Image: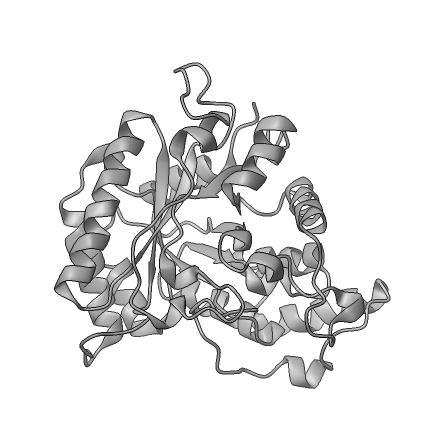
């Protein structure tokens, strides 16, 4: 089994917060949210509604991006993990760590025409720990290394006592079972999807909810790192500077321009982030390996955002791939959402 870059980088970051290490993840777990639209628009029919890639094509992109070796984590659904990790052994000789979405709260139930994201989030998980680790409902101690030993667990707080209490109780149950089975996790905290009682400072509210939640967690029960919406420099610096044992990462959010993706990563790292998980931005790019190559260059400090956009367009031209926008338009910032939206 190859040494995983995630484990090496986590150790170095915790030892020296000023090191240049940065953890990059490709989030290919959208089939636990979007359904048919999860694989993304078929590039050949990009402007035709309802024309999407197949799940087989989606999984082939996962294989390609893992073999490229520039991401540290590949996040998948439990069913994709069963095929690629357990059955096909995709990660056996790779430094990339497989991970599974450990829960699918109702705010990411994005069926076409569904109203679930407009209702307060409720905790739920369809993936089981044993199925993620060995592919069946009861793993022996010796079987737990066959699949993924890392999960993403997500929380959505809505500033409502009963809703948030139920969310945290389900998280407690997950952590208790996960620790007993040697199942690690990282914690995603979404913005409120239907804020019941508005707050004056959303960044401060989420930071407070995160640190008070973590304060009651010890040892192996704690998440390896956080995945949160990037709400600007002040909120990121506040959380990243609060606890030297806490590694903070960002979620990419909805697709926008190429500059949006590269600048968000560059700015978040500047203000304390050490992890980025990009799903829709990678999946909706013109050429995923080339896009990931440039995300890695920005994450490692080799290019700034503007340089990366120009370089990306240059490589698309060499590949004879038509960009979705001209260079000038692709260098603009747009207003994007960190929420999941129906596709």
| Residue 253 % position (x, y) | 48, 67
Does residue 284 show up? yes
The colour scheme of the drawn protein is: one colour
62 relative position to 277: left or right: right
Q: Report the side of 151 relative to 258 (left or right).
A: left
Q: Residue at x 55, y 37 (%)?
A: 81
Closest to the observer, 301 or 74: 74
The answer to whether residue 262 is left or right of residue 103 is right
Q: Quadrant of the N terminus?
A: top right
Q: Nearer the viewer, residue 263 or 50?
A: 50
Pick whichever, 283 or 55, lies toward us.
Answer: 55
Tell me, yes or no, if residue 242 can be seen here. Answer: no
Q: Residue at x 68, y 66 (%)?
A: 41
| Residue 334 to residue 61: above or below | below
Quadrant where the C terminus sits is bottom right
Residue drawn at (26%, 71%) of the image: 203
| Residue lying at 54% horizontally and 74% vertically, measured from the top left | 260
- Quick check: 145 above or below 317? above
Quadrant in the picture for residue 268? bottom left
**What is the count of numbered marks?**
0
Between 41 and 11, the residue placed more toward the observer is 41
Residue 123: image location, x then y, percent: 30, 53
Q: Position of residue 331 (x, y in %)?
A: 62, 81
The quadrant holding residue 67 is: top right
Residue 106 in the image, given as x and y percentages of width and height = 37, 59
């Amino acid at each position: 089994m190859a040494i995983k870059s995630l484990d090496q980088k986590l150790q170095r970051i915790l030892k020296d917060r000023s090191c240049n290490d940065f953890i990059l993840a490709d989030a290919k777990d959208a089939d636990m949210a979007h359904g048919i639209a999860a694989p993304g628009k078929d590039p050949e029919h990009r402007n035709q509604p309802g024309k999407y890639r197949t799940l087989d094509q989606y999984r082939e992109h996962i294989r390609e991006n893992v073999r490229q070796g520039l991401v540290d984590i590949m996040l998948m659904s439990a069913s994709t993990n069963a095929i690629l990790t357990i059955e096909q052994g995709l990660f056996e000789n790779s430094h990339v760590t497989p991970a599974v979405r450990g829960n699918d709260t109702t705010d990411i139930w994005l069926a076409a025409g569904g109203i679930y994201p407009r209702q307060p989030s409720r905790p739920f998980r369809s993936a089981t720990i044993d199925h993620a680790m060995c592919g069946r409902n009861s793993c022996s101690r010796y079987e737990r290394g066959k699949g993924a030993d890392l999960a993403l667990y997500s929380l959505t707080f809505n500033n409502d006592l009963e809703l948030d209490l139920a969310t945290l109780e389900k998280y407690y149950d997950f952590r208790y079972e996960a620790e007993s089975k040697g199942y690690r996790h990282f914690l995603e905290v979404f913005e409120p999807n239907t804020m019941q009682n508005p707050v004056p400072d959303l960044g401060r509210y989420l930071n407070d909810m995160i640190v008070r939640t973590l304060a009651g967690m010890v040892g192996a029960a704690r998440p390896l790192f956080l995945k949160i919406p990037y709400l600007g420099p002040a909120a990121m610096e506040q959380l990243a500077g609060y606890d030297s044992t806490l590694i903070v990462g960002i979620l990419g959010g909805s697709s926008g321009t190429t500059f949006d993706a590269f600048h968000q990563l560059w700015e978040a790292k500047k203000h304390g982030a050490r992890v980025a998980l990009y799903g829709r931005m990678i999946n909706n790019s013109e050429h995923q390996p080339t896009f990931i190559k440039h995300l890695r260059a920005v994450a490692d400090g080799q290019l700034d955002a503007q340089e990366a956009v120009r370089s990306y367009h240059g490589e698309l031209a060499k590949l004879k791939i038509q960009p979705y926008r001209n260079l000038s338009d692709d260098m603009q910032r747009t207003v994007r959402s960190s929420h999941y939206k129906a596709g």
